Image (cartoon, rainbow, N blue to C red):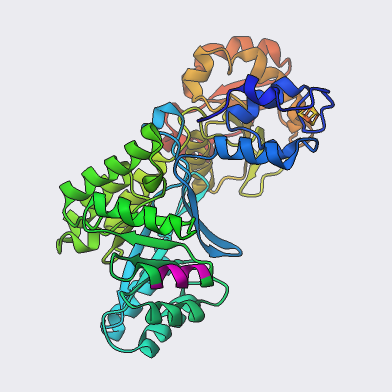
């Protein structure tokens, strides 16, 4: 049960020394209760208090880590059923399957697409995260050598090693070096041996039942054996069955604190259909509700990109708009006679406008005003992009030392503030830019200082 700020305050020294970075113990307690600060930031609390608060504030779904070093993939850590209640924490991992019985060119194609299908969007690189290496019969040597090949060809991939045999997984773990793969999977038949291997190797372990009930029983059994990092697979391989199981897992963990389901899940759209489009539809459903990882049969740009965008949209924090820093951004190497544009700091606006300015090839200065992530018209309506605020920002931005002219291009939608802004910025000529970002290149190419 989560502790309230007042309950946490009772365990603090109440000296208000500020060493935790917050001025008072009460404010710190409130932050800890809201999950915005770690109790360990107060140097004066005992280990006992740390443990008590840490346990009470741990998310109902454990965060499980795969990999190591610079390439650590995290799944789980979720605290809510619906995104608007707080936010979703760790984006669903998107993975591709390679098997030991695949033809050479098939494996090479999948690894190459994993490495090359990457997309820049709002300053982020969108890409797949996981490669699942499956033993399809054969010998341990073939399995270990495929793992080695995947590790060296795709070093940033989080690995899932799949075999029913602990000895195969053991050889795969050795081939992973210091990378800690997810071992798939402990079943009713091999649970003890898999648990021993996971403990010895320090790797997370997937739990595969044939039903939700069997998965719960296995999870409980493995926790009793001391395993902490588990990943759930209900065994269902139909869209409806798997979808329902994901909801049962999430609801039981977040609403009822049901410990056997307090772990992220893994699903296999690759085993639910042979139709690539249906597979991407199934994947999309599982990203929305509530898979920690989805394994696809292959990666193709036309299906991967929409899935990545869906994931990006779902896993942004609904209470914090995506923003870029307030600053003066030089684009295309501007000089003293280059045009100066101003817009808001909503990241989508920034990336669209800066992309168009860059595409115009006209050297320009782009002034980004902090509007708390609101877009141009919304920010203006909310009083965060008004003439007085833009005026004072332009004055303190230092742009007057970078250009000889005094022309400022404002977004076309803000034409109505031209007069007010000229009053705020004496000596500046306010020019009204295009309403649509796509018209910026033509505008800039024609632009001349007044
Ligand atoms: S460091 Fe500890 S004692 Fe000091 S203000 Fe923060 S919570 Fe209070």
- Asked if residue 421 is positioned above or below residue 114 in the image, the reply reads above
- Viewer-side residue, 398 vs 68: 68
Image position of 158 (left or right of 207): right
* Snapshot quadrant of residue 105: bottom left
Vertical order, 263 against 207 (above or below): above
Quadrant of ligand 1: it is: top right
Residue 212, horizontal then vertical, whole percent: 25, 50
Question: Which residues are the magenta region?
Answer: 193-199
Quadrant of the rendering where the C terminus is positioned: top right
Q: State the count of labels.
A: 0
Residue 237 visible, this angle: yes
Q: Is residue 114 visible?
A: no
Residue at the image point whose x is 61% and y is 64% from the top: 69
Q: Residue 371 at what x, y percent from top left?
A: 58, 24
Which of the two residues, 133 or 137, is positioned nearer the viewer here? 137
Magenta segment main secondary structure? helix
In the rendered image, residue 167, in percent from the top left (x then y), is placed at: 39, 82
Please identify the quarter of the rendering in which residue 146 is found.
bottom left
Would you place residue 105 above or below residue 448 in this image? Answer: below
Query: Considering only vertical position in the picture, is 165 above or below 17?
Result: below
Name the residue rendered at 39%, 39% in the picture: 313
**Which residue is at 53% across, 16% downward?**
380
Q: Is residue 180 left or right of residue 26?
A: left
- The answer to which of 305 and 377 lies nearer the viewer is 305
**Magenta stretch contains residue 197:** yes
Report whether 43 appears left or right of 246.
right
Q: In the depicted view, which residue is nearer to us: 418 or 92?
A: 92
Q: Position of residue 329 (x, y in %)?
A: 65, 40
Magenta stretch: residue 352 in it? Answer: no
Q: In which quarter of the image is residue 394?
A: top right
């Amino acid at each position: 049960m989560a502790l309230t700020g007042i309950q946490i305050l009772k365990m603090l020294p109440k000296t208000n020394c500020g060493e935790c970075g917050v001025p008072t113990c009460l404010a710190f307690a409130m932050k800890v209760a809201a999950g915005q600060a770690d109790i360990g930031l107060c140097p004066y609390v005992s280990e006992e208090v740390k443990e008590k608060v840490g346990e009470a504030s741990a998310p109902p779904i454990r965060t499980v880590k795969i990999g190591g070093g610079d390439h650590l993939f995290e799944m789980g850590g979720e605290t809510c059923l619906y995104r608007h209640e707080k936010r979703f924490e760790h984006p669903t991992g998107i993975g591709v399957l390679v098997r030991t019985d695949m033809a050479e060119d098939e494996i090479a194609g999948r690894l190459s697409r994993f490495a090359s299908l990457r997309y820049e969007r709002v300053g982020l690189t969108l890409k797949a995260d996981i490669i699942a290496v499956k033993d399809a019969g054969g010998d341990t040597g073939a399995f270990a050598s495929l793992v080695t090949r995947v590790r060296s060809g795709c070093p940033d991939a989080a690995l899932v090693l799949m075999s029913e045999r602990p000895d195969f997984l053991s050889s795969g773990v050795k081939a992973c070096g210091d990378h800690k793969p997810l071992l798939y999977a402990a079943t009713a038949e091999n649970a003890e041996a898999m648990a021993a291997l996971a403990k010895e190797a320090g790797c997370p372990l997937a739990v595969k039942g044939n039903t939700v009930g069997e998965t719960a029983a296995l999870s409980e059994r493995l926790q009793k054996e001391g395993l902490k990092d588990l990943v759930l697979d209900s065994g269902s391989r139909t869209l409806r069955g798997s979808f329902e199981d994901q909801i049962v897992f999430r609801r039981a963990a977040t609403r009822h604190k049901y410990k056997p389901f307090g772990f992220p899940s893994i699903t296999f759209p690759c085993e639910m259909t042979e139709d690539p489009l249906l597979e991407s539809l199934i994947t999309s459903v599982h990203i929305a509700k509530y898979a920690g990882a989805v394994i696809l049969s292959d990666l193709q740009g036309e299906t991967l990109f929409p899935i990545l965008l869906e994931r990006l949209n779902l896993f942004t924090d609904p209470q914090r708009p995506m923003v870029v820093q307030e600053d003066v951004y030089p684009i295309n190497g501007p000089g003293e006679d280059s045009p100066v544009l101003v817009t808001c700091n909503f990241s989508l606006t920034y990336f669209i406008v800066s992309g168009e300015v860059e595409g115009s090839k006209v050297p320009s200065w782009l002034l980004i005003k902090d509007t708390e992530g609101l877009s141009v018209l919304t920010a203006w309506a909310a009083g965060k992009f008004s003439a007085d605020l833009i005026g004072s920002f332009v004055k303190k931005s230092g742009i007057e030392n970078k250009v000889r002219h005094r022309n400022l291009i404002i977004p076309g939608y803000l034409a109505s503030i031209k007069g007010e802004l000229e009053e705020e910025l004496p000596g500046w000529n306010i020019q009204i830019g295009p309403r649509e970002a796509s018209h910026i290149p033509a505008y800039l190419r024609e632009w001349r200082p007044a």
